[in-house]
Amino acid sequence: SIKPLHNYPGNIELDGADVSISPQIATTVVLIFHELTTNAVKYGSLSVEKGKLRISWKVESNGLNIDWKELGGPPVQAPTKTGFGLSIIENAINYEFEGTSKVNFEQDGLHAQIMIPLDFIGEKEDNLFAMEQVKEASMHIDPGKGNRSETSILILKDDFINAQEMKRMMSMLSINTVTTCSNQQKALQAMESSEFHLALLDVNLKNETCIKVAQECVKRRIPFFYITGYGSSFLKEGGFPLASVMEKPVKIEKLKQIMYQSIVS
């Protein structure tokens, strides 16, 4: 993520022992480093010949802690608003893996601190996921009539970028009360504390499926749709509650149709 982008040889210092991270989290980490590097090359310490970038890392009791420190670059100013790149850096690893990522715009250079949880350190064989078996249940959908602006939507999606894109599309459809969750536990907790009029459930999450949340939707009589690239036969064979399927990639035209059918009609 760094070597192809920086302009001056010798201005990057690396300090840390070799450590491997799970392929599951690697893409997100690379994306964060790409955003940090792009910012450093355009505006930070890697944009000038005398600038320095020091990256150190160490496995500690809480996980792999990575320290990104820029020095000797142009004067640093915190942005007046959070752009897409900064949003990825600060939120993606927390949303998807419950790690942490903090960015401080210090006077002598940008300083980022990233923590990757221990569960994703070292190479591990993928655990085989045993599909939970449940009885099929029919779901009664009574959409009624309502105001879109007052509609509350639950989105279960483990990918931060796609979750934010779906949230953006909902906003374009005048639906502003949207809760995004990256795993079943968070979604079930959200359902305990909030009332939802519709749920959109990504079938395949990290190390689990959405089946428990689907069952809870049936129990609470919340209309819901599955998001999957595998088709409806996969759901039937896995014992998932019956519901309509929205195939990936999610398009705003399809979301608009769902809103009309489930809420406005």
Image (cartoon, grey):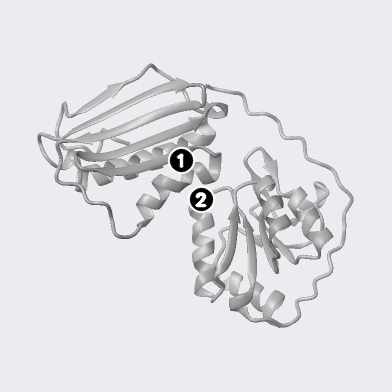
x and y percentages locating residue 28 in the rendered image: 46, 40
| Image quadrant where residue 150 sits | bottom right
202 and 14: which is toward the camera: 14
Q: Residues within 10 Å of mark 1 (few under 14, many from 20)?
A: many
Which residue is drawn at the image coordinates 54% and 70% (left, top)?
176
Amino acid type of the residue tagged 2 in the rendering: Phe
In the shown orientation, is residue 244 left or right of residue 137? left
Secondary structure type for disc 2? helix
Question: What residue lies at 60% left-to-right and 60% top-to-bottom?
Answer: 179
| Quarter of the view holding residue 57 | top left
For mark 2, what is the residue?
Answer: 160
In this rendered view, identify the residue nearer to me: 152 or 254: 152
Residues under numbered marks 1 and 2 in contact, where contact means CB atoms less than 8 Å apart: yes
Q: Which residue matches tag 1?
A: 28
The spot of residue 18 in percent (x, y) is 40, 18
Front-lying residue, 232 or 123: 123
Where does residue 8 sit, x and y in percent of width and height?
14, 33
